[in-house]
Amino acid sequence: MLQESSVDSSGSRFAPLVVLELASDTKEEAIAWLLSRIRDRQQNGGAELLVEQLGPGIGLEEKENPNMFLVGASMQRLLCGAEDLGLFKECTDGSMRAFTFASKHNFKDFKGDGDGFLSMAECQYVIKHELDTLRAKEETNVPGYSHAKLYPGKSIIRRLLSKGILIQMFPLHENEELKRLSFSWYKKVKVSLQPLDDIRHYYGEGQALYFGFLEYFTFALMPMALIGVPYYLFDWEDYDKYVVFAVFNLIWCTVILELWKRRSASLAYYWGTLCRKKAFEEPRPGFHGVLGHNPVTGRAEPIYPTSKRHLRVYLVSLPFVLLCLYLSLYIMMIYFQMEGWALSIYDENPTFWTHILLFIPSIIYAVVIEAMNLIYRYAAEFLTEWENHRLESSYQNHLVLKVLVFNFFNCFASLFYIAFVMQDMELLRQSLATLLITSQILNQFMEAFLPYWLQRRRNKKMIRKIQKRRLYEEKELPLVEQVRLEADMSTYLGTFDDYLELFLLFGYVSLFSCVFPLAAVLVVLNNITEVYSDAFKMCRVFKRPFADPAANIGVWQLAFEAMSVIAVVTNCALIGMSPQVRSYFPESETQLILCTVAAEHVLLGFKFILTFLIQDVPKHIQDKLARLEFESLEALKKKRQLHGGKCWKPRSSVRLSSEEDRCACRY
């Protein structure tokens, strides 16, 4: 675990895993109440965790927040929490099963008291779950804060976050393990696969699946890149040959997405997330409404009418999105005016410098697109928050839809206009190349190097205070200074932006492949640098995120599949517009359109046939899942037979003599 152990108020030593930072002016009665609830036994409604206050740092020349607390747990408590969460672990027979404390010795790598059986990321996830499910009992408000109302069954941590009493909650880094991961991940340039198991062990399944998809996407682009180079070099204007390339691209899009489902299912199975049942989703921290009763849980919680939410979505959010799309269209027309101006100057005086001037409007437009996407992202987050969605999944779905629609329109509308209205293939190639290269450079700068530079500026005072000039990863910081240093680091906001970038790159490759075959080469080069920059920012720039036990890439799979369907229509239309294809229908424009539509339908049909033929989950994993379900049903039958067909319940008169017995029998 960490280099130093802490001692809580009861004298028990524990390894700190999670940090809670309360506001510096938090009232003492609120702090005492929160700590007592965290330490209290589960039978009394507490979390039964270990917690202590962080001591003062080195030097007092600047004001420090005294209300920072370290949270940990005993190994027995962590194992019980793992059972609560239904974590899947590998058994001695090689199968993946939900961990149970009673049969702990049947699991592979469980030795002694279980120390080291759970990864640090899993331990931190257990603690986060226990803190998130810490619920109010008879309290009507947070002590000392009459405005911070509490309802029976309401999550205490979520209420403290929404009221600004709790500033942040984050897991701590483990320096030695982080050094090893950094060295094998990005500190040496090598031609090898990413250490996905190590990434999963340290950051959790959600992060590992993103980097697994990034790696898979890069390798999947190799055939496109290798085929695209000779097309680019030798036969630029021969559209008959591009038909073969476009058809290959469309089949490629379908095959790689289907094979990724199999790859992600295999990873999720061996990481233990494919079989996990999704926990009951709690209301979001920012959700508000009139106090009522949840018909599912029976708890008192805020209720907000669905009709009001729909009014906000359709009468405010939807018109706002349409207004933003209109603004994007207006800026696109300004870009075309700039293109016309640059072209007129080049026609009057065709020199080297006027030729360079032809690329300036596209570069400016690419920068404007990135700025508009960033501004719109903040507006979309504000609107989605204002819509007051009850569940985090609903919030994420509405946010993803808003951002995807705008980014797709903003990034590709000009290319569609050039291709199908202006029908200028030379300008289309130039604009696509400029947009692709400029967006890649800006994304690399904004994602890693700018946050790292800002982070270094923020931490200069801390580095001077401890009077060490070596880099953070190369020094052995005291625990107090490590905690305060990590508290000042930027918060990682998840994989949303990373997947969005890959989605747009996938669009650049697939939508106009028959016009710019070199796009795949540029995206491969970008993804290679993306692996290193993303690994760098995870290890050096951001706080450690909590593990996300994901089984797949979620809604992004649907987004990529939708893009592949649009790519079929786009490429068929581009091929149908080519002079070579038009020459086959010199007298009838209608026949050309009908043949193009027929070819498009044939390709779409072939896509969907491939989708059904390629199974999402490999056969050997399907067999293992079926066997696990069969054994679960057989075990349930035997239990019912032993207890006369009645559901077994532990007798309340049983006296529990140890923590192990309590963990094994409380269910």
Image: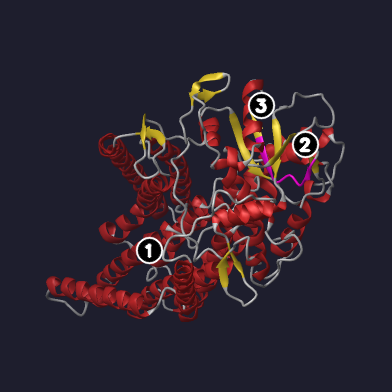
- In the picture of the structure, the residue carrying the numbered disc 2 is 10
Q: Which of these two is toward me, 628 or 352?
A: 628
Taking the image as shown, residue 488 lies to the left or right of residue 133, namely right
Q: Which mark is residue 426?
A: 1
Q: Residue at x 20, y 71 (%)?
A: 597
Q: Which of these two is toward me, 19 or 528?
A: 19
Residue 19 magenta-drawn?
yes
Q: Is residue 640 above or below residue 45?
A: below
Q: Which mark is residue 465?
A: none
Answer with the quarter of the image where residue 100 lies.
bottom right
User: Which portion, as a residue range, is magenta?
Assistant: 12-20
Q: Residue at x 55, y 45 (%)?
A: 493
- In the picture of the structure, the residue carrying the numbered disc 3 is 32
Q: Amino acid at mark 3?
A: Ala
Compute the Cα span from label 2 to label 1: 75 Å
Compute the Cα span from label 3 to label 1: 70 Å
Q: Earlier in the sequence, mark 2 or mark 1?
A: 2
Q: Amino acid at mark 1?
A: Glu
Q: Which of these two is toward me, 540 or 133?
A: 133
Query: Could you classify mark 3 by the number of other residues whose Cα lies within 10 Å: few (under 14), some (14-19), or many (20 or more)?
Result: few
Q: Amino acid at mark 2?
A: Ser
Query: Could you classify mark 1 by the number of other residues whose Cα lies within 10 Å: few (under 14), some (14-19), or many (20 or more)?
Result: few
Q: Is there a contact, CB below 8 Å, between mark 2 and mark 1? A: no
Front disc: 3 or 1 = 3
Q: Position of residue 470 (x, y in %)?
A: 84, 46
